[in-house]
């Protein structure tokens, strides 16, 4: 029994001890496994950590490099800004505060512009004016146009008035810096170029230019005056030469005419008397009486030509007095309308200057000139719509070579006019376009006008009419020619 119990006990003991050893073995194996796998996990974690550390180190190096690059770029930008001869300033578009500025910008405003401070042009201590001196509205400044108008680049001339009262002329430019998806303006680049010296030089140049222009105008006026005086002197010299030549020619004609008149007048008078005696003393057929009439009329005409020639060659003596030219013309027009050669169908009118001072002339001589011209005008009209106008003008500055104030008398008609080839000869002695003319009327008129120191000239268009213009100096003195 005991043996059985002992054997049973051994079996029980063995049965009880077998799990314990197994568990011990299994526990040990578990610990070994845990340690083994834990070690492996830690190894892997360590490697990952090392990789992360390496990545962080590389990232740090990259960041350090980028920071260094940024700092280098910033320094390079600073160097560039400092090397720019103009003032450069970058400001925040919304606040107007300085982001970066160079020393030149600070110099212009009188103090350094530090980051975070308000840009001076937006301060009340500074004033920006237009070149005219009027204050510059902010919206009209390049800064305002860049911010409010969104204009990419704006420049304008402005005058900066600093707090100490000093004025600086600036060429101001502004350009917006945009960023973001909406391309909103974030910052503004401002550029200030000091052009004070340039403006001063321009003002000096403008001043010198104006002085030069004034001097040029003055010299030009003097030269023009000298030219007018030279032209007037030349015209006077030319007229004097023409008068001398004419005087010599007339002197020669006068001597010849006197000889001819002396040799012809007596036989001519005898011829006229004989013809008249024959006509009155004999009973002759009508055709013979007509021939005697022709002899008498032509001998009378020839005698008149001789007398006119002698009168033309004699010196003109003027008896001057102060005359109202309008009264003289009115008397002439009254006489003209009553003359047998005047055609009643012709309309004669006058147009007088409103204010005409008296003029010193020989009234009889001027009346002779105007009568001859008016009669020529009437005789030049050969149609039923004839018009003759006599007008006067007062020329304070003179005209046609007369430098002193003068009077102009114009006789205009709408007659047949004068041939261009004949116009330059109408004042020559013995030149006439009339069948019964002597050719001395206008020649005498010119001598009388020139004796008064005046000028007579003709303007004519064929079949449209003629204008005779007379210019008489206001004060001619007691000339005798």
Image (cartoon, rainbow, N blue to C red):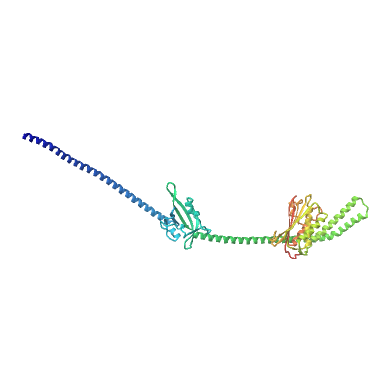
**Residue 78 in view, yes or no:** yes
Answer with left or right where residue 267 lies relative to residue 454: right
Q: Quadrant of the C terminus?
A: bottom right
Residue 282 image point, x, y percent:
93, 54
Residue 66 image point, x, y percent:
35, 50
Considering every residue shown, the one lying at the far front of the view is: 1
Picture quadrant where residue 437 is located: bottom right
| Number of marks | 0
> 377 or 14: which is nearer to us?
14
> 279 or 100: which is nearer to us?
100
Considering every residue shown, the one lying at the far left of the view is: 2
Name the residue at 59% across, 61% down.
Answer: 214
Q: Quadrant of the N terminus?
A: top left
**Residue 429 in view, yes or no:** no
Answer with left or right where residue 134 lies relative to residue 303: left
Picture quadrant where residue 407 is located: bottom right
Name the residue at 81% across, 59% down.
Answer: 308
Residue 211 image point, x, y percent:
57, 61
Picture quadrant where residue 95 is located: bottom left
Answer with left or right where residue 217 lies relative to residue 389: left
> 89 or 38: which is nearer to us?
38
Residue 419 image point, x, y percent:
75, 51
């Amino acid at each position: 029994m005991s043996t059985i119990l002992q054997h049973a006990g051994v079996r029980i003991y063995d049965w009880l001890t077998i799990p314990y050893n197994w568990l011990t073995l299994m526990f040990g194996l578990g610990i070994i496994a845990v340690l083994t796998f834990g070690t492996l996990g830690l190894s892997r974690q360590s490697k990952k950590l090392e990789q992360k550390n390496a990545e962080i180190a590389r990232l740090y190096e990259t960041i350090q490099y980028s920071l260094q690059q940024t700092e280098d770029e910033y320094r390079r930008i600073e160097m560039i800004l400092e090397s720019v001869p103009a003032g450069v300033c970058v400001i925040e578009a919304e606040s107007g505060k300085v982001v970066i500025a160079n020393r030149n910008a600070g110099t212009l405003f009188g103090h350094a512009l530090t980051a975070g401070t308000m840009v001076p042009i937006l301060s009340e201590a500074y004033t920006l004016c237009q070149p005219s001196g009027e204050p510059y509205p902010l919206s009209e400044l390049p800064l305002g146009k860049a911010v409010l108008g969104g204009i990419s680049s704006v420049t304008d001339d402005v005058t900066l008035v600093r707090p100490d009262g000093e004025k600086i002329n600036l060429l101001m430019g502004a350009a917006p810096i945009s960023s973001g998806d909406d391309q909103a303006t974030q910052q503004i680049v401002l550029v200030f170029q000091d052009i004070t010296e340039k403006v001063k030089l321009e003002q000096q140049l403008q001043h010198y230019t104006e002085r030069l222009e004034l001097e040029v105008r003055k010299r030009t006026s003097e030269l023009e005056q000298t030219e007018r005086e030279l032209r007037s002197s030349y015209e006077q010299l030319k007229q004097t030469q023409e008068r001398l030549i004419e005087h010599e020619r007339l002197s020669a004609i006068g001597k010849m005419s006197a000889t001819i008149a002396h040799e012809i007048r007596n036989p001519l008078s005898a011829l006229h008397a004989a013809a008249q005696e024959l006509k009155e003393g004999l009973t002759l057929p009508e055709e013979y009486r007509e021939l005697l009439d022709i002899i008498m009329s032509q001998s009378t005409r020839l005698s008149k030509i001789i007398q006119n020639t002698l009168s033309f060659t004699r010196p003109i003596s003027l008896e001057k007095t102060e005359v109202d030219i309008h009264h003289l013309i009115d008397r002439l027009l009254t006489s003209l309308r009553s003359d047998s050669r005047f055609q009643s169908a012709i309309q004669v009118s006058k147009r007088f200057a409103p204010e005409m001072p008296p003029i010193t002339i020989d009234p009889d001589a001027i009346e002779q000139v105007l009568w001859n011209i008016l009669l020529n005008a009437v005789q030049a009209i050969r149609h039923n719509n004839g018009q003759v106008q006599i007008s006067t003008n007062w020329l304070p500055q003179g005209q046609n070579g007369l430098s002193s104030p003068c009077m102009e008398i114009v006789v205009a008609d709408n007659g047949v006019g004068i041939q261009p080839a004949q116009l330059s000869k109408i004042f020559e002695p013995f030149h006439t376009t009339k069948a019964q003319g002597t050719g001395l009327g206008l020649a005498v008129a010119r001598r009388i006008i020139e004796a008064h120191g005046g000028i007579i000239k003709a303007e004519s268009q064929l079949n449209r009419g003629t204008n005779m213009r007379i210019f008489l100096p206001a004060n001619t003195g007691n000339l005798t020619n």
